[in-house]
Amino acid sequence: MSGETSRLIAERLDLRYDDRVVVEGLDVAIPDDRFSVIVGPNACGKSTLLRALARILRPHAGRVLLDGRTIHSMPAKEVARTLGMLPQSAVAPETITVLDLVGRGRFPHQSLLRQWSDADQQAVEQAMDAAGVTELAERPVDELSGGQRQRAWLAMVLAQQTEILLLDEPTTFLDITHQLDVLDLCADLRADGYTIVAVLHDLNHAARYADHLIAMADGRIVAAGTPEEVVTPELVAEVFGLACTVVPDPATGTPMVVPAARTRRTRLRH
C-alpha cells in the first residue's frame, strides 16, 4: 500500500519480560484508516507488540512513535485521548456495573475544569449500543458470561472515542455470531475513518476482514501487506507449520485457508 501514512510507528523495538527476549529489532508502521490484524502462532510476540504500541510495555530498546512523538514521553491522558486499548484479560473492579465500566472510558476527557457532560453521556450510550450491551447496563460485570464481559470492555474502549483502537483478541470468549458482530463493528469503524489494530487467532477471519495483515513468528515480522499478499500456502507453512490450500472465500473472495486432510498417525487400541 504505497503512499499510505502512519501515525503509529515502531522503530527497532526490543521487547523483553525480565531477561526473556520476546521481540528484537522490529520495525512496523500501522497504516492510517485501515483495519490491521496481527496473526501468528502462540507465543510469537503478537500481544507483546500490541502492548508496546499501546504504551503499556516500555521497550528495552527502540521506540514507538505516535504522531511523530515518542509515546513514552507523552502524558498518559494525552495518549488515551488518541489511542484506546482493549487488553487480553481485563479485570474489572468487584461489583462495578456495565454502565459504570463503560463510563470509565470517558476518564481521559475529564479534568478539574471539565466534568461529566451530555457529550459524555451520549458517547457512553452510543458505545453500549454499538457493542450490544445496553440491556446489561445495570448488571455487575463480574456476573456476566465471558462473551458479555468482553463486549462490555469493548464498549468502554469505544466510549473513549479515540481515532486509533488496539484490540488484543477481541473475539475471545464469544460464540461465532458475536465474533462476527465484533468484526463487523470493526469494519464499520474502519469505514468511518478509524485506525484499528487487532490480534486475532482465526486466520480466515483475519483475511476476510483486514485491509492489512502483519504475520509474526518468533518475535519477528515475516510478512506484511494485503490478505492476498500474505495468506499463501508457503507463508502459512512457514509461520504456522500447517500444510494447506488457499482458495477464494465463497462469500467474499478473500483468501481462505483449507488445511490439508489429516492422516491417522497411530492406532491407540489393539
Image: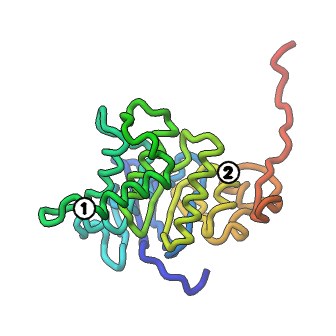
Disc 1 marks which residue?
117
**Amino acid marked by disc 1:** Ser
The residue closer to the viewer here, 182 or 57, is: 182
Q: Give the percent coordinates (x, y) of residue 95.
A: 30, 32
The reply to whether residue 43 is visible in this rendering is yes
Q: Is residue 59 visible?
A: no
Pick out the residue farthest to the bottom. Answer: 3
Q: Residues within 10 Å of mark 2 (few under 14, many from 20)?
A: some
Depth check: 156 or 45 in front? 156
- Residue matched to label 2: 240
Amino acid beneath label 2: Phe
Image location (x, y in percent) of residue 151: 48, 46
Q: Secondary structure at mark 2?
A: helix
Label 1 environment density (alpha carbons within 10 Å; few <14, some 14–19, many ≥20): few
Cα distance between the residues tagged 2 and 1: 49 Å
Looking at the picture, tell me which residue is in the foreground, 209 or 123: 123
